[in-house]
């Protein structure tokens, strides 16, 4: 009987600790970012494809065309890292050329993330005034 009571108390104590569980967060959906000068959108679908819209230019998904070349944009996200690591994988079908855009993101809440894009093949290590933007989930 003592063991059952001890097990019950331990279970109650462990379940009472609140953690910011990122595992219940999903990037899937449409996101809008605005830095005061430009507005951009990301759409992450459930199949792992990403769509990007900046300055009226829309690219991404399973199959898109830009400047006469067809390609796709996928994304990979590592929720276990802090900040989360997000990679956009651009593939041009002609020649099967692939390039990764390395990013980081920090969950503010389920509908708001702080986002930073890396350039020159490097992932940002932190958020700075020059490389960060807040994205809000667009709910239909």
Image (cartoon, helix red, strand yellow):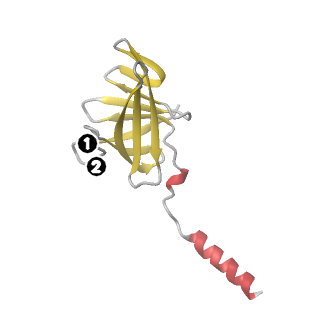
Q: State left or right for residue 125 relative to residue 13.
A: left
Which is more toward the observer, 24 or 61? 61
Q: State left or right for residue 80 relative to residue 130.
A: right
Q: Are marks 2 and 1 in contact (CB under 8 Å)?
A: yes
Quarter of the image with the N terminus in it: bottom right
Question: Which residue is under mark 1?
Answer: 131
Residue extending furthest toward the top: 68
Within the image, what quadrant is residue 72 found in? top left
Q: State left or right for residue 35 relative to residue 75.
A: left
Q: Position of residue 8 (x, y in %)?
A: 69, 77
Residue extending furthest toward the right: 1
Question: Which residue is under mark 2?
Answer: 127
Residue extending furthest toward the bottom: 2
Q: Residue at x 44, y 19 (%)?
A: 64
Q: CA distance from mark 2 to mark 1?
A: 6 Å
Q: Position of residue 90 (x, y in %)?
A: 39, 29
Residue extending furthest toward the left: 130
Q: Residue at x 40, y 35 (%)?
A: 88
Residue 96 position (above or below residue 119): above
Residue 46 position (above or below residue 65): below
Label 2 secondary element: loop
């Amino acid at each position: 009987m003592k063991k059952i009571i001890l097990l019950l108390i331990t279970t109650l104590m462990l379940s009472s600790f609140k953690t910011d569980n990122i595992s219940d967060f999903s990037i899937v959906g449409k996101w809008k970012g605005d830095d005061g000068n430009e507005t951009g959108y990301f759409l992450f679908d459930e199949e792992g494809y990403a769509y990007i819209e900046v300055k009226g230019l829309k690219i991404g998904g399973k199959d898109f065309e830009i400047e006469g070349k067809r390609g796709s944009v996928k994304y990979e996200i590592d929720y276990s890292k802090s900040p989360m690591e997000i990679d956009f994988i651009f593939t041009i079908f002609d020649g099967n050329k692939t390039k990764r855009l390395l990013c980081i993101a920090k969950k503010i809440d389920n509908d708001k993330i702080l986002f930073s894009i890396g350039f020159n093949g490097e992932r940002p290590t932190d958020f700075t005034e020059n490389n960060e933007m807040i994205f809000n989930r667009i709910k239909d």
